[in-house]
Amino acid sequence: MSKIGYIFGPVPSRRLGYSLGIDAIPFKTCTLNCIYCQLGRTAQTTLLRKEYVKAKKIVKEVKIALSSGKTIDYLTFSGSGEPTLNSKIGEMIREIKEFTSIPVAVITNGTLLALKEVREDLRFADLVIPSLDAANQKTFEKINRPFPSLRIEEIIRGMIEFRKIFSGKLYLEIMLVREVNDSPPELHLLKEAVEKINPDKVQLNTPVRPPAESWIRRVEREQLEKIKELLGEKAEIIAEFKRKETRAYLKNIEEEIYALLLRRPVTRQEISATLGLHINEIVKYLEILEKEGKIKAEEYAGEKYFQGKE
Ligand code: SF4
């Protein structure tokens, strides 16, 4: 595993095999402030699209990463914010596709698919995975706490339009939170929206990592199975209730993080900066250390701090 500036991995994942992550957005620059976000709260949601990270830099780093000769199944725009907020995402996808045949994926919260220019930007990708956690405005506001002007019906309409022009694969991800979006009326509305959007797959998830809000509860496996039945044959469960050992998981990194946390309380960003690892990787190690009871997390002035226990 390596990290060169805005590129991280390749990280093995169930959905994408060995995925090289491309992070084209500063930490938690997002249109949403989801209650389940594993990166903590969004300080201020935004709709401002701009070249947060220079497209040239990203393309150059992708080239360097590809020259390492490591197995890479997907080049994936994801990371620690909403990737479509980078106004050059379309240009980056097109340029990358000029020098590699490795498929390009975009993991997005889907909100900006309401905009024609974003639909045009993403149409050159091979796989797009947008999220849709609610099909009515009230629940959308409760679970995703969006930028105030975002309207879920416009987002769903955007996804329907995108499906019409996009010839790649479209997987819709639904994050289910107990007693927030798992009631029969909510699921019925989601099912209607899914049928209109017509994705290739519907991927059901539930928060299994420490979320932004400690009160949220996951949906248990049995209930997820019922929801999968309801949503039909395209639906599958992707929530990983048990951590699988992967080649990306390294004991010495866990030990380094633990040693750092024994010295003083630190935030995820500080761990990331100190150890030169991407924040998405740090989150996985913190989850394991928390489960093992080796660390504790506390909030101070809106920031989450992690500290090691002797
Ligand atoms: S889960 Fe994704 S979309 Fe939601 S706040 Fe976090 S980064 Fe943004």
Image (tube, helix red, strand yellow):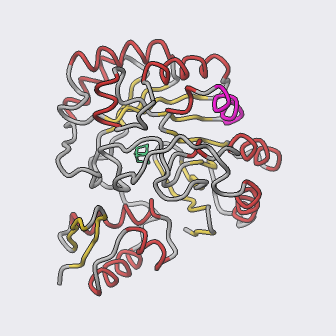
Where is residue 67 shown, x and y percent of the image? 75, 64
Where is residue 4 shown, x and y percent of the image? 63, 69
Where is residue 288 shown, x and y percent of the image? 28, 64
Q: Reply yes or no: does residue 94 show up in magenta.
A: no
Quarter of the figure with the C terminus: bottom left
Q: Image point 48% across, 50% down: which residue?
A: 13
Q: Quadrant of ligand 1?
A: top left
Between residue 253 and residue 308, name the one nearer to us. Answer: 308
Task: Say if 257 sits above or below 25 in the image.
Answer: below
Q: From the viewer's perspective, is 91 left or right of 210? A: right
Quarter of the figure with the N terminus: bottom right
Q: Reply yes or no: does residue 118 show up in magenta.
A: yes
Question: Which residue range is magenta in the image?
Answer: 116-125
Q: Image point 29% across, 65% down: which residue?
A: 304
Task: Say if 110 sits above or below 211 in the image.
Answer: above
Badge count: 0
Task: Say if 147 sits above or below 229 in the image.
Answer: below
Extreme residue in the front direction = 149
Between residue 276 and residue 215, name the one nearer to us. Answer: 215
Q: From the viewer's perspective, is 140 left or right of 59? A: left
Q: From the viewer's perspective, is 144 left or right of 308? A: right
Where is residue 250 shown, x and y percent of the image? 42, 72
Extreme residue in the right direction = 98
Q: From the viewer's perspective, is 166 left or right of 188? A: right
Q: Quarter-wise, where is residue 57 in the image?
A: bottom right
Q: Image point 35% across, 70% down: which residue?
A: 267
The dominant secondary structure in magenta is helix
Q: Image point 43% across, 18% down: which residue?
A: 194
Task: Say if 246 sits above or below 35 in the image.
Answer: below
